[in-house]
Amino acid sequence: MNSNLGPRLKKSWPYMLVTFLFYTVTPFAAACIELSTGAPAGTLFNLTPILDCCVSVAIGYFYGKRCARDPIMPLFCGAAFLIEMAVYYGASAWIYVPLAALSSFIGQCFGNLYANRG
């Protein structure tokens, strides 16, 4: 077991908070916008998993620049999307769970690459 889990979590909690808030607020906002504007049902709502993966890359990039590659963030992105999937989408969106984790890991790799160049 890794004994430095506490400091790693202290460095990563702001990134986790932003990720969790984005994952939970975005589908709700998309559904509200569709209801209020009369847009065709599901257009914005169905694009939010793809937007979540793009945000996972961006947050993973900044996390990777600061904290290097760490498996905590991709695992958290997968778990946060699992919660979003259970609340908003249902079991048909399970494929986005590993995709969210993988996109966060890819962002971390790029962030770590560019952090080491300076």
Image: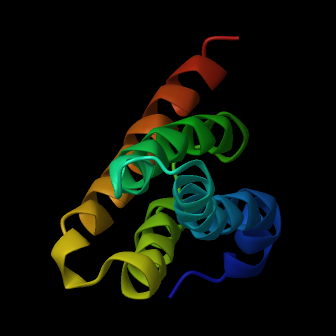
- Residue 106 at x, y percent in the picture: 38, 39
Residue 109 vs 67, above or below: the answer is above
The answer to whether one can see residue 13 in this image is: yes
Q: Residue furthest front?
A: 38
Residue 101 vs 110, above or below: the answer is below
Quarter of the image for residue 73 reads bottom right
- Residue 67 at x, y percent in the picture: 68, 47
Q: Is residue 28 left or right of residue 118?
A: left
- Residue 88 at x, y percent in the picture: 43, 78
Give the tally of numbered discs. Answer: 0
Q: Residue at x 61, y 43 (%)?
A: 59
Residue 67 vs 35, above or below: the answer is above
Q: Residue at x 59, y 68 (%)?
A: 28
- Residue 107 at x, y percent in the picture: 47, 37
The answer to whether one can see residue 116 in this image is: no
Q: Quadrant of the C terminus?
A: top right
Q: Is residue 93 left or right of residue 59?
A: left
Q: Residue at x 23, y 70 (%)?
A: 93
What coloring was used for the rendering? rainbow
Near-viewer residue (118 or 53) = 53
Q: Residue at x 80, y 60 (%)?
A: 14
